[in-house]
Amino acid sequence: KLTKPIVIATWNALLAVETAAKILQNGGTALDAVEQGCRVEEANEDGQSVGKGGLPDSDGNVTLDACIMDEKGNYGAVLGVENIMHVISVARKVMEDTPHAMLVAEGAEQFAVSKGFKRENLLTEKAKKAWEAWKVKSEYKPIINIENHDTIGMLAIDQNGDISGACTTSGLAFKMAGRIGDSPIIGGGLFVDNEIGGASATGLGEEVLKTVGSFLIVELMRQGKSPQEACEEAIGRIVNKPGKDFKDFQVGYIAINKQGEIGAFSIHEWFNYSIFKDGENKNIKSDYFNK
Ligand code: SD4
């Protein structure tokens, strides 16, 4: 019996979801679907927090982070990579073609080039102008929802009922050089267990990392929570820390379980996700904590 394919992705990533959905409808794997879906956003120059057109770090360099997990629990990641647009595909190559799980910076870039990826300048004129304007004051402050619009975390179930996930970002705008967020870290920005489900995160990566958010959500689902309940509890772990002042940052989670139920929750309003289910693509506003 074939499963009905489902795709879910952070933010307004309808084109990415559509691309992934087509692959699944044609009998493709969840792994191919999430990789190809993420590539759409990486190539979209308007997206300011992923791939080409992403806002640079404080030195003006665009550095990308990505990871991918397949239905067998395999994981591959690249961190702090410059000059290569499709880092999600490089992460997949790390997973499939090396004995390792993570490659960082120049080593990752060299590996990508050795696999036939082309080097290119990822800093667009628009992103350069934004960085030059920021440099005047050089003040780093994570701002709710402003920079956090298009990091893409994507989860999919294919017709075999197998689950895979992918996550790709340029990280926080004007981050310190060398800073890595949650997105490429297993259990942080992404976690998939094919027996249970998957989860992915967006927003202020430091807070996701400190609570091992995506792993937490999958483990809560394993204990019987619905994807929605699990996302809400993971947000709770952040906002309920003693004295935590969460008014200036956002975190959003998406999750899916093996039964095809989905969940999404964020700290603040305006987090949204894109979904393909029952043959339809939709963008949906997430429920949130701070009402
Ligand atoms: C990070 N979680 O690097 C990412 C940023 C993000 O949309 O989600 N931006 O912390």
Image (tube, rainbow, N blue to C red):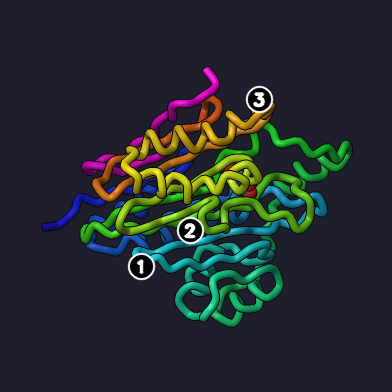
SS of the residue under disc 2: helix
User: Three-letter amino acid code at disc 1?
Assistant: Lys
- Mark 2 or mark 3: name the one nearer the start of the chain: 2
Residue bearing the label numbered 1: 72
Q: Position of residue 73 (x, y in %)?
A: 40, 65
Q: Report if residue 113 is visible in the image.
A: yes
Check if residue 280 falls in the magenta segment: yes
Part of the protein shown in magenta: 272-291
Mark 3 neighbour density, 10 Å: few (under 14) some (14–19) many (20 or more): few
Q: What residue would you read off at disc 2?
A: 39
> Is residue 36 in the magenta section?
no
Quarter holding residue 27: bottom left
> Mainly helix, strand or loop, the magenta region?
strand
Instruction: State left or right for residue 193 relative to residue 253.
Output: left
Which residue is drawn at the image coordinates 63% and 41% (left, top)?
A: 207
Q: Residue furthest top?
A: 291
* Residue at 57 percent of width and 53 percent of height: 183
Q: CA distance from mark 1 to mark 3?
A: 38 Å
Q: Is residue 275 above or below residue 78?
A: above
* Residues at circles 2 and 3 in contact by the CB criterion of under 8 Å: no
Nearer the observer: mark 2 or 3; the answer is: 3
Place of residue 263 in the rendered image (x, y in percent of width and height, measured from the top left): 37, 37
State the residue position of label 3. 247
Residue depicted at x 58% and y 35%: 238
Q: From the viewer's perspective, is the residue at label 2 or at label 1 nearer?
A: 1
